[in-house]
Image (cartoon, rainbow, N blue to C red):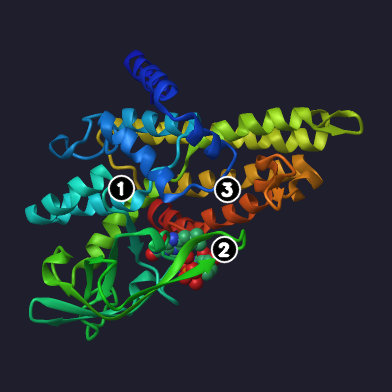
């Protein structure tokens, strides 16, 4: 097993790092590293810089704008972006819907949607979860009844990230409720968010932020040519997509940058007149976190080595989601520990700055990051996957 980068891979990493240094707009980077709220315009601004460079969709086939990078290069690129403090790329169009279209879409669907996703013309969201159908996704009930060349959709989605900003939503709907196996009779539809009958209502998370929504469908008419793959075979599409969702949850580059920031921040804090990093309890937690992150990186490199050899990542790739998100949460916990009462600071009163904005963002961020162990398949569900498919239990 080879856990080192080759000379070519190191040269590629240096090229990417240099390019990011020159092209990542300072204002965007500052927002990311201070945990500021990123608007749709911020996200699209970075999307368009990468699109102009031809690097927005490395995993796509070259004919649709992919870079022809191998899996290691793609990983290096993602981690360098995270390490540099680049805004995250919204995955719903670029990674998820595109992967489905490339695998299951008709030529007409690819030609209609892929170039717009590439350019950032359309913002997408993911309509999978419903009330009572999250982990048990196959029990979903939103119905789509065929009438001529249209489906009529009725039902509700929940926790739909960015639905309030989205132009399109990809949805799992039930086209046949008479079948015994709940995975049968599901179809995959692409729906224009401006279609009459769609209502989006905000759900405010415990950090006070608006990123998720409820989406209601009342007699929403969807042309049949916006169904991807066969009617009733949407579960095949859904499973394919969930695999893609899981591959990119470790976010090692971002966690490394945040760990460096945490160390510098803690070294500057005083406890009993000494740097906080001298405190044995704090140092112990910090060391454990750093070791976990190193172990995660090595595990990730092991997966990459598997992929280099042409093998599939396997069910144990769920480890990356579990450990990656636990580390992201631990980082926010230790930042709060280090900041102590400073984390209660508010950024401003009546527009006048009161405290460092990064400090004021710490407590909301701590609350916000609780989501990471729930979304993209909760960590309990990931453990079930490892138990059943990797360890052969149950
Ligand atoms: C911030 C955020 C953004 C999201 N964005 C989207 C989105 O854009 N689109 C979308 O479709 N969905 C989205 N989701 C929904 C997410 O996929 C679900 O919340 C998740 O799948 C869990 O489903 P649930 O909320 O219904 O909880 P439940 O499935 O009811 O689970 C509740 C608890 O029980 C545990 N549990 C459930 N079943 C088992 C089991 N068999 N074994 C062990 N433990 C179990 C779970 O781990 C969890 O802790 C988002 C969620 C969050 C929090």
Q: Of helix, strand and loop, which one carries label 3?
A: helix
Residues under labels 1 and 3: Cα distance? 23 Å
Classify mark 2 as within 8 Å of ligand 1 or not, answering yes or no: yes
Q: Badges 3 and 2: C-beta atoms under 8 Å apart? A: no
Residue 30 falls left or right of residue 43? right
Q: How many marks?
A: 3
User: Can you say whether 235 is above or below 319 in the image?
Assistant: below
Residue 275 placement (x, y as % from top left): 82, 28
Residue under circle 3?
326
Q: Of helix, strand and loop, which one carries label 2?
A: loop
Residue under circle 2?
205
Q: Which corner quadrant of the image does residue 222 belong to?
A: bottom left
Query: Nearer the observer, disc 3 or disc 2?
Result: 2
Observer-nearest of 113 and 328: 113
Residue 313 falls left or right of residue 296? left
Classify mark 3 as within 8 Å of ligand 1 or not, answering yes or no: no
Residue 97 placement (x, y as % from top left): 26, 54
Q: Which of marks 1 and 2 is nearer the N terminus?
A: 1
Q: Which corner quadrant of the image does residue 242 belong to?
A: bottom left
Q: Earlier in the sequence, mark 1 or mark 3?
A: 1
Residue 111 placement (x, y as % from top left): 11, 50
Q: Residues within 10 Å of mark 1 (few under 14, many from 20)?
A: many
User: Can you say whether 89 is above or below 384 in the image?
Assistant: above
Observer-nearest of 207 and 25: 25
* Residue 160 visible in the shown view: yes
Residue under circle 1?
95
Residue farthest toward the bottom in the current orientation of the protein: 178
Q: Which of marks 3 and 2 is nearer the N terminus?
A: 2
């Amino acid at each position: 097993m080879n856990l080192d980068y080759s000379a070519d891979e190191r040269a590629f990493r240096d090229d990417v790092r240099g390019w990011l240094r020159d092209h990542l707009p300072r204002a965007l980077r500052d927002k990311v590293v201070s945990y500021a709220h990123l608007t749709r315009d911020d996200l699209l601004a970075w999307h368009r810089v990468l699109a102009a460079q031809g690097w927005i969709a490395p995993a796509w086939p070259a004919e649709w704008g992919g870079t022809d990078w191998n899996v290691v290069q793609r990983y290096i690129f993602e981690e360098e972006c995270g390490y540099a403090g680049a805004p995250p790329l919204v995955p719903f169009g670029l990674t998820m819907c595109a992967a489905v279209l490339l695998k299951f879409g008709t030529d007409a669907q690819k030609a209609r949607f892929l170039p717009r996703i590439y350019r950032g013309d359309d913002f997408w969201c993911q309509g999978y979860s419903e009330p009572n159908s999250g982990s048990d996704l196959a029990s979903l009930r939103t119905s789509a009844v065929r009438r001529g060349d249209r489906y009529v959709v009725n039902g509700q989605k929940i926790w739909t990230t960015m639905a309030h900003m989205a132009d399109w939503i990809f949805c799992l709907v039930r086209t046949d409720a008479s079948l015994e196996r709940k995975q049968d009779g599901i179809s995959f539809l692409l729906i224009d968010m401006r279609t009459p009958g769609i209502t989006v209502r905000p759900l405010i998370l415990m950090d006070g932020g608006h990123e998720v929504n409820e989406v209601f469908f009342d007699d929403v008419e969807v042309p049949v040519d916006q169904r991807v793959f066969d009617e009733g075979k949407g579960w095949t599409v859904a499973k394919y997509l969930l695999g893609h969702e899981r591959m990119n949850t470790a976010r090692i580059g971002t966690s490394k940058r945040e760990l460096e920031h945490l160390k510098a921040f803690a070294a500057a804090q005083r406890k009993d007149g000494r740097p906080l990093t001298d405190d044995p309890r704090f140092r112990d937690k910090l060391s454990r976190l750093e070791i976990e992150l190193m172990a995660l990186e090595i595990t990730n490199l092991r997966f990459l080595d598997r992929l280099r050899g042409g093998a599939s990542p396997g069910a144990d790739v769920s480890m990356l989601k579990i450990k990656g998100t636990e580390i992201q949460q631990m980082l926010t916990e230790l930042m709060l520990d280090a900041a102590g009462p400073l984390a209660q600071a508010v950024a401003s009163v009546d527009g006048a700055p009161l405290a460092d904005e990064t400090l004021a963002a710490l407590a909301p961020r701590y609350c916000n990051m609780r989501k990471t162990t729930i979304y993209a398949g909760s960590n309990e569900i990931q453990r079930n996957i490892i138990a059943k498919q990797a360890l052969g239990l149950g």
